[in-house]
Amino acid sequence: MSIPTSSIIAGTMNWGEWGKNFNTNEIQQLIATCLSENICAFDHADIYGGYTTEAAFGNAWKQMNVDRENVHFITKCGIKYVCDQRDYGIKHYDYSKQHIIASVENSLKNLKTDYIDVLLLHRPSPLMQTEVISDAITELKISGKIVHFGLSNFTPSQTDLIRKYTAVTYNQIQFSATHLQPMLNGEIDYMQLHGIKPMAWNPLGSIYKEDVPQTIRLKELLQKLTLKYNLPEDILLLAWVLKHPAQIKPVVGTTSVERIKTLKKLQNFELEMEDWFAIWTESIGTKIP
């Protein structure tokens, strides 16, 4: 079992109470649209929707009679999030063996499945004990409850701490045309060197969230590129991420059926090299080094 061959991962964070709060039928429509567009990996975290989105997704998916082998479930654990569903005194991280295993068992129950394709540790904790994490992951793999293991938002040195005792297959990081740091500070190089497959959350960056000099420059360039390629801006931004040789898989968090359908435009499309560098140039606001 492995992550699907599709280049895009569907992010579910905004499908539930933290976003559109879709009902069962609406979630089923999103799932069906993703599958029809060959997007078969779904990215979750236990905390999404205040610990409610996994279950809403699982209830919808279970009623669809989709072959489990045709979908891939990614989920994350480790954050204890203060909300109506949990009475924690403060948001914090917990990577005890007990909590990791309990989180996975709860996600299995929520998602109505016998196994998780990819389990990620959601955020690094200064208090994490790598031997304890290794014990938990080993037990979960032996029992068949998880297939692959990875990280989320871990730096190379933090990843090395985990890799001392446990193989790491994935790391989900923030990366986009407005958040270039992982490409420049060695994070993505490190993953390529060690066979760790990158996923990128927020792959569209802050283009549609901020009007600052960086995004203004990029929007002006994107207007020209949309005319050149006859493609929408979001497709061009995703194509910029996909062109990187690390084979980064963007986690696309759209809640729109129509936007999911437009993702097919990425098939057999590749930005020309100069346009890729033009996006980098406008992002930093000067000539590249």
Image (tube, helix red, strand yellow):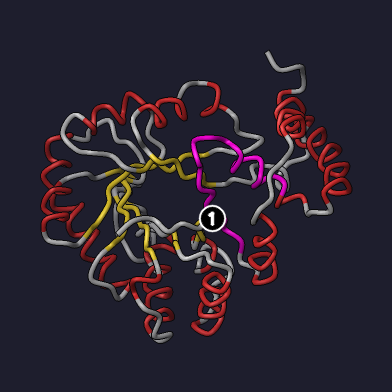
Position of residue 99 measured from the top left corner of the image (x, y, whole percent)? 19, 53
Position of residue 31 measured from the top left corner of the image (x, y, whole percent)? 51, 74
- Please, what is the three-letter code of the amino acid marked with disc 1? Ile
Quadrant placement of the C terminus: top right
At x 15% / y 34%, what residue is drawn?
Answer: 165
Position of residue 20 measured from the top left corner of the image (x, y, whole percent)? 59, 69
Q: Relative to 222, is 16 above or below?
A: below
Position of residue 265 measured from the top left corner of the image (x, y, whole percent)? 70, 59
Is 48 contained in the magenta span? Answer: no
The residue under label 1 is 8
Count of picture labels? 1
Q: Relative to 189, is 46 above or below?
A: below
* Residue reaching furthest to the top: 289
Q: Secondary structure at mark 1?
A: loop
Is 240 contained in the magenta span? Answer: yes
Residue 71: quarter of image = bottom left
At x 29% / y 65%, what residue is drawn?
Answer: 107
Residue 4: quarter of image = bottom left
Quadrant placement of the N terminus: bottom left
The magenta region covers 236-254
At x 16% / y 54%, what residue is drawn?
Answer: 141
Q: Is residue 116 left or right of residue 190?
A: left
Q: Is residue 174 left or right of residue 262?
A: left
Disc 1: CA contacts within 10 A as few (<14), some (14-19) or many (>=20) = many
Residue 72: quarter of image = bottom left
